[in-house]
Image (cartoon, rainbow, N blue to C red):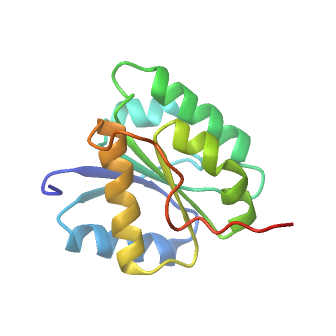
C-alpha cells in the first residue's frame, strides 16, 4: 500500500528529481526533498519518512554506508526503507551485499519506471520486515572483472 507513505529524496540532478517526483506522486506517495547529499541522520529524523531514495555520487559510498548503519541502529528509524541509486553500476555491485544485509535496495541509473517502483517497494517491504530474507536486488549486474 503506497497511499500516504512519504519518501524523502536526495537527488543532485533536478531533472531526475522531477521525474522521481512525478513517478512517486503517480503511485500515491508523498515526496519530500533532502537539503543535503547524502542526507544526514538528523534530516531523516526530522522528516520521519517511510522511505529514503539516495543518489550516490563519487565519494559518497562510505558516508552512505555510515548513514545506513545509523538508520538500522536507531529504534525510531530502523524500519525506514532505503533505495540507493547511482550511475556507477560498479559501485552498486561492490556494495550490493552489505546493503542487502542492512535491508536496503540498490538501483543503477538509468532505470525504467517498473524497475524503479519494484525496487522502491522491495526497499519499503524489506525494511518493514514484510520480506524475510535480505538479498541483492534482481537488477544487480555482476561483472567478472
Query: Which residue lies at the image location 41% right of the left edge and 41% below the top edge?
Result: 133
Observer-nearest residue: 144 or 68? 144
Query: Which residue lies at the image location 72% right of the left edge and 40% below the top edge?
Result: 62
Query: Which residue lies at the image location 21% right of the left edge and 74% below the top edge?
Result: 26
- The image quarter in which residue 20 lies: bottom left
Q: Is residue 108 above or below residue 67?
A: below
**Residue 32 in sight from this viewpoint:** no
Query: Which residue lies at the image location 49% right of the left edge and 48% below the top edge?
Result: 135
Total tally of numbered discs in the picture? 0
**Residue 35 in sight from this viewpoint:** yes
Observer-nearest residue: 86 or 30? 86
Give the x, y percent position of residue 71: 47, 29
Give the x, y percent position of residue 141: 64, 69
Give the x, y percent position of residue 63: 68, 39
Left or right of 28 on screen, residue 62: right
Give the x, y percent position of residue 68: 54, 35
**Quadrant (top left, top right, bottom left, bottom right) of the N terminus:** bottom left
Observer-nearest residue: 81 or 141? 141
Amino acid at each position: 500500500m503506497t497511499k500516504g507513505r512519504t519518501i524523502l529524496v536526495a537527488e543532485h540532478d533536478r531533472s531526475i528529481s522531477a521525474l522521481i517526483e512525478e513517478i512517486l506522486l503517480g503511485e500515491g506517495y508523498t515526496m519530500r526533498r533532502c537539503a543535503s547529499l547524502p542526507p544526514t541522520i538528523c534530516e531523516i529524523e526530522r522528516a520521519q519518512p517511510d522511505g529514503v531514495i539516495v543518489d550516490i555520487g563519487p565519494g559518497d559510498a562510505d558516508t552512505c554506508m555510515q548513514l545506513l548503519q545509523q538508520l538500522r541502529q536507531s529504534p525510531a528509524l530502523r524500519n525506514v526503507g532505503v533505495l540507493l541509486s547511482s550511475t556507477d553500476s560498479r559501485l552498486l555491485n561492490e556494495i550490493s551485499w552489505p546493503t542487502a544485509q542492512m535491508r536496503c535496495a540498490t538501483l543503477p541509473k538509468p532505470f525504467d519506471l517498473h524497475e524503479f517502483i519494484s525496487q522502491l517497494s522491495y526497499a519499503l517491504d524489506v525494511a518493514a520486515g514484510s520480506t524475510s530474507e535480505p538479498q541483492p536486488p534482481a537488477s544487480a549486474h555482476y561483472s567478472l572483472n
